[in-house]
Image: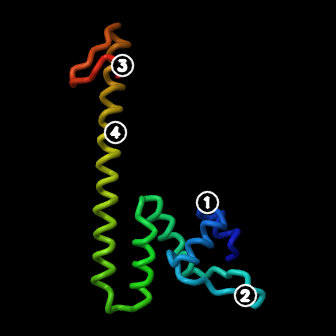
Amino acid sequence: MTIKEVCEQFDITPDTLRYYERVGVIPEVNRTKGGIRDYTEEDIKWVENAVCMRSAGVPVEMLIEYVKLFQEGDGTIKARRDLLVEARVEVQAQLDKYQSTMDRLNYKISRYEEAIKTGVLTWDNCESKKN
């Protein structure tokens, strides 16, 4: 696959894809005799992993470390697992934050829906009328 096709598949820019390769978020991609990147199915899996992890907020540095460990072989299985556990903790913290925001939005919407029915806007959860 060409860089253009990969970028279209994952909705990322060529600059982002080149950056991922340059810093080690994905392993080095083979090139044609003309020097053009030629993405294999294995490369695509790495790109998919990078895009997924980055969209979840996993830091680039953690992904770089994961790729390095992977390339070192099976002796790093525990270290790779530990990195993924650390990433999961960080992602869970983000999910908790979003859930708290969602709960607040749901509460506010419910109060406004009740006000539409009754004509009176009330807050019973220590909410200010200004919110």
Marking on residue 32: 2
Pointer 1 local density, CA inside 10 Å: few below 14, some 14–19, many at least 20: few
State the separation of the CA atoms marked 1 and 4: 27 Å
Quick one: label 3 or label 4, which is nearer the N terminus? 4
Quick one: label 3 or label 2, which is nearer the N terminus? 2
Residue 97 appears left or right of 39: left
| Residue with the mark numbered 3 | 112
Residue 67 appears left or right of 4: left
Q: Circle 3 sits in a helix, a strand or a loop, which is it?
A: helix
Residue at 28% across / 20% down in the picture?
128
**Amino acid type at mark 4:** Thr
Pointer 4 local density, CA inside 10 Å: few below 14, some 14–19, many at least 20: few
Marking on residue 11: 1
Asked if the residue at tag 4 contacts the one at tag 3, i.e. Cβ–Cβ closer than 8 Å, the answer is no
Asked if the residue at tag 2 contacts the one at tag 3, i.e. Cβ–Cβ closer than 8 Å, the answer is no
Q: Is residue 80 above or below residue 91?
A: below
**Amino acid type at mark 1:** Asp
